[in-house]
Image: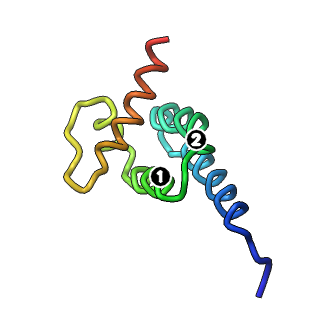
């Protein structure tokens, strides 16, 4: 059937893929927000938390940037608790 992956290898590959995606968004602004966030956090995230990150990363860059910059309220389907983690992480970086 192919190579069997253990859960550990599978999550490691998933983390690597999400980190890559976070740095290669298409807009430099979102790269610089999601890239450092992913670098700092994905190794500690479990599967359900990676799901939350992935869900947020599936949003389009222009609205996502507006939400992070607090220029617009995100729609109801967006996980605002997780979005707030990204915002807090970004704020802490720009204040340094």
The residue lying at 60 percent from left, 46 percent from top is 19
Q: Residues within 10 Å of mark 1 (few under 14, many from 20)?
A: few
- Quick one: label 2 or label 1, which is nearer the N terminus? 2
Q: From this view, report whether residue 22 is shown above or below residue 2.
A: above
Q: Position of residue 85 (x, y in %)?
A: 39, 36
Q: Residues within 10 Å of mark 2 (few under 14, many from 20)?
A: many
| Quarter where residue 1 is shown | bottom right
Q: Secondary structure at mark 1?
A: helix
Whether residue 33 sits left or right of residue 1 in the image: it is left
For the residue pair 74 and 5, the one nearer the viewer reads as 5
Give the mark toward the camera: 2 or 1.
1
Residue extending farthest to the bottom is 1
Return the mark for residue 49: 1
Q: CA distance from mark 2 to mark 1?
A: 18 Å
Q: Secondary structure at mark 2?
A: helix
Q: Position of residue 13 (x, y in %)?
A: 68, 58
Whether residue 24 sits left or right of residue 2 in the image: it is left
Q: Position of residue 79 (x, y in %)?
A: 31, 50
The residue lying at 41 percent from left, 36 percent from top is 86
Whether residue 65 sits left or right of residue 96 in the image: it is left
Return the mark for residue 23: 2
Residue extending farthest to the top is 96
Q: Position of residue 81 (x, y in %)?
A: 31, 42
The residue lying at 37 percent from left, 51 percent from top is 60
| Quarter where residue 64 is shown | top left
């Amino acid at each position: 059937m192919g190579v069997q992956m253990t859960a550990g290898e599978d999550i490691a590959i998933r983390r690597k893929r999400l980190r890559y995606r976070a740095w290669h968004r298409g807009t430099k602004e979102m790269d610089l927000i999601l890239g450092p966030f992913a670098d700092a956090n994905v190794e500690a995230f479990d599967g359900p938390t990676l799901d939350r990150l992935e869900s947020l990363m599936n949003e389009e860059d222009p609205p996502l940037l507006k939400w992070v910059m607090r220029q617009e309220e995100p729609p109801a389907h967006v996980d605002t608790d997780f979005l707030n983690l990204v915002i807090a992480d970004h704020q802490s970086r720009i204040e340094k």
